[in-house]
Amino acid sequence: MKFRANKPAMGSLLVRALFFSAAAALTINPALTPVVAAAEATETPVVTTGSAKTRFLALGIGKSVIIDLPREVKDVLVADPKIANAVVRSAQRAYIIGAAVGQTNVVFFDADGQQVAAYDIAVKRDLNGVRAALRQSFPGIQIEGVGDSVILTGSVSSPIEAQQAGDVAARLVGGADKVVNSIVVRGRDQVMLKVTVAEVRRDIIKQLGVDLSASMNYGTAVVNFNNTNPFTANGGPLVPDNGFSASALTKGLPSVTATMRAMESAGVVRTLAEPNLTAISGESATFISGGEFPIPTGVTCQTTTAGAIGQCVQTVTYKKFGISLNFTPVVLSEGRISLRVMTEVSEVSTENSLTGGQNGTTIPSIKTRRAETTLEIPSGGAMAMAGLIQDQTKQAINGMPGLMQLPILGTLFRSRDYVNNQTELMVLVTPYIVRAVAQKDLSRPDDGFAASSDPQTDLLGSISRIYGVPGRTEPPARNYRGAYGFITD
C-alpha cells in the first residue's frame, strides 16, 4: 500500500507502511502543523543495533517531538500505531506523537532500504500538571509514571502529609488504585496512651415479709390456713426461709403461727483499670490482661471397631475476660493527635448464669464495659471518652388480696421487696507524644524490694522489706515518715 504526500515546495515523498503481526499503520497528514514536544520528551544515549543507532524516547500522551534525520528517508515503520504515530513532513524531518500509554518503536529507512534511524518509544502519562501541583504544596515529594500508574517518592515530616499527598495525586490521575505511595516519614513520633476506666457501683436490698399459718378444729373437721408471701423484685428471696416466729397454741383451741422474714443488704463495688500503651504514629497497638474460663460445648465419644460407644470426653471452649486496649494514633500538625480507641473491661459474674447438664454445671456470664470511638486531642490533654450513670430501682409488694390493704394489720398479710442499684462509669483517655529515655530514669515496682530474713519473719511476722533504690537520692523537700513504697508491711 502506498501513500503520497502532495506538497509543491518539497516535491513528492513516498512513504510505505510495513505491516507485521499487529498490522502496523502509518499516518500521513500533509496539513498537520508542526508541534514542538513539551519537556516530557526525553532522549537517552544511543544503543547500536545492527545498521542503525537506537535511541530511547519518552513521550507524554498527546505530546510530540521533532526528529531531524541525518539523510533523506523514503520509508518509516511504526510497530504499534495505537501507542505512537510518526508523521513525515520533509525528506529529513519527522514528528513522533504519543497516543496511549505503552511502548513501541519507530524505524526510518532510506531509498536503498537501509536504516537511517531507530527509536524506542515509551509513552507515559503527562505528569507536568500533577508535578507542578504537588511541588506547590509538598516540595519534598516527586512523582513518576509507571505504566498506567504513578509512584510517589520523597520524604515528609508527618504521616498526615504523606496521606494528603496521596489523596491529591489520586484526584489528579483518576483514582487511588493508580497511586503507589512510597513516601517516607521523617522521625515518626511515638504516642503513649493512658486510659483510666473507673466504676463505682452501690447496691441496696431490703426485704420484709410475714408468713401466717393457722389450724382450727371443728369436731371432726380440720381447717388449715397458710399464707406465704414471696419476694419477686430481685427474682427470688435473699433472706433465709427461717426467721423470727411467734405461735399461740392452746389445747383444744385454734393455733396460729407467724414467721417474719427480714433482711437489709448494702454493698459497694469499685473497679479501676489503667492500661498504658505506646505505639508509633500510624501503627496500631493492642494490650490484653486477663484470662479465659471454659464453657462446656458437648461430649465427644470414641467409637470402637464393633460400633460400640467407647470413652467420652467433655469438650469446652474458652471465653476471654479482663482488660483490653487497642488504639491507632496519628500525629497531626501542631502537636494534635488523632486517636482510634477501643477499650474494654470485662469480668466473670454469677448474674444471668446458666445451670444445666447431668452434673449441674454452672456456666457464668461476663459483665462487659466497652467503648470505641475516634477523637482528636492535643498531647497531654485528657478527655472523657465515655461515661455512664445508671440508677435502677425495683420494688414489689405481695400478699393476700383484701387483707394486705388493711391500714396496720395488713402488714401481717404482705411482703415488701426493694432493690436499688446505682452505677457510675467513666472512661478517660490521655495521649502523650513521648521520646526514649535512659534506663536510669525509669523505675520498676520491685525497685528496693527484698525478702525478709528468717528472724524477721518468725519474730515480727514480716514477709518483705523495702530499701531505697540504689543510686537514687530523694529531693530534700520530700521528708517521708514511716513506711512507704509499693509494698509496706
Image (tube, helix red, strand yellow):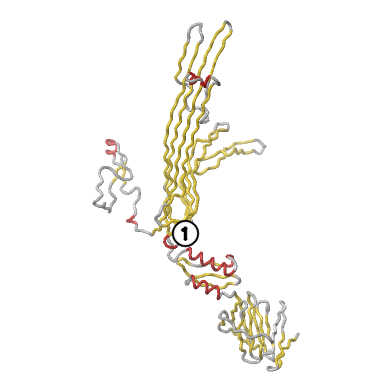
Residue toward you, 354 or 199: 199
Where does the image place residue 356, in percent across and percent down from the top left?
A: 57, 33
> Horizontal placement of 11 versus 468: left or right?
right
Residue drawn where x is 55% and y is 74% of the image: 129
* Residue at 42% from the left image edge and 65% from the top image edge: 187
Does 347 appear above or below 418?
A: below
Residue 479 position in % (x across, y down): 24, 47
Image position of 477 (left or right of 84):
left
Q: In which quadrant is the N terminus drawn? A: bottom right
Residue at far front of view:
407
Q: Determine the image quadrant of residue 360.
A: top right
Q: Where is residue 451 in the image (x, y as percent from the top left)?
A: 31, 43
Judging by the rendered image, the residue that carries numbered circle 1 is 330
Q: In which quarter of the image is residue 49?
A: bottom right
214 relative to 451 in the view: left or right? right
Quarter of the rendering occupied by the C terminus: top left
- In the image, 307 versus 340, the foreground residue is 340
Task: Tell me the kind of residue under disc 1.
Answer: Val
Dot 1 lies on which element? strand
